Image (spheres, grey):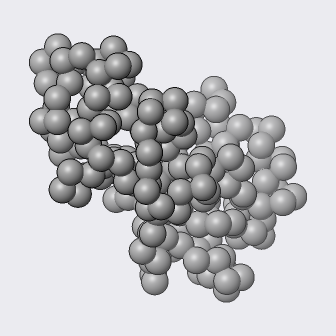
Amino acid sequence: MSGVNRLRLSQLLTQALRHVPGEFGLVLDDQGWAKLPDVVAAIGRAGFTSVEDSTVRDLVARQTKTRLEISGDRIRAAYGHSLSTVVDHVVVSTPPPVLFHATSPEAWEHILREGLKPMGRQFVHLATSAEQAMIVGRRHAQRPVLLRIDTARAAGHGVQFRNGSDSVILTDYVPADCIAADS
């Protein structure tokens, strides 16, 4: 992948496959899959003219967070969609006892009253480590609030957890009484 900005390519792929496939001329099936040759062509039209099928496959194989997945000649975003695409995520029968989410202080005040909601996404994203949550949280606030999710308590409320990737667990909602903030 010499000469290709891997970060920018990854961001462009996730944007196209999570949020705005139509802007790239892509059609996703009901599980979020697009044809890899169509995606490579779309990326070329967006300025990545040297990107080939093998470039995208290499990027996906080397990703540190499983944001994208390839199956045969198809590719999709593993999670994070703001579209009506519904990716089947495996239910996690025994999630870690604590999951993490980092947010802005302003959002924390709202979460304290109403719980964690997916907002513009299909699912609430929870990290398996505090460090990963803080990385994401810093995108939204200079000094994010680290939230700890009591998964046993949440499960007692009927909350189901789904596997998003190796470091992300997804859910529809987390009640406020299952959330504590680090002080």
Q: Is residue 160 left or right of residue 5?
A: right
Residue 167 appears in the picture as rendered: no
Which residue extends farthest right? 113
Rendered residue at 14%/24% (across/down): 1
Q: Is residue 164 left or right of residue 183?
A: left
Q: In the image, residue 166 lies at what x, y percent? A: 34, 59
Rendered residue at 20%/24% (across/down): 51
- Residue 14 lies in quadrant: top left
Q: Is residue 30 above or below residue 183?
A: below
Q: Is residue 130 above or below residue 173?
A: above
Rendered residue at 58%/77% (across/down): 160
Viewer-closest of 39 and 112: 39
- Residue 111 lies in quadrant: bottom right
Viewer-closest of 38 and 112: 38
Viewer-closest of 24 and 99: 24
Q: In the image, residue 38 lies at what x, y percent? A: 30, 37
- Residue 100 lies in quadrant: bottom right
Q: Is residue 91 left or right of residue 107?
A: left
How many labels sit on residues? Answer: 0
Rendered residue at 64%/77% (across/down): 159
Q: Is residue 107 above or below residue 129?
A: above
Residue 137 appears in the picture as rendered: yes
Q: In the image, residue 114 lies at what x, y percent? A: 84, 60
Q: In the image, residue 183 lies at what x, y percent? A: 69, 48
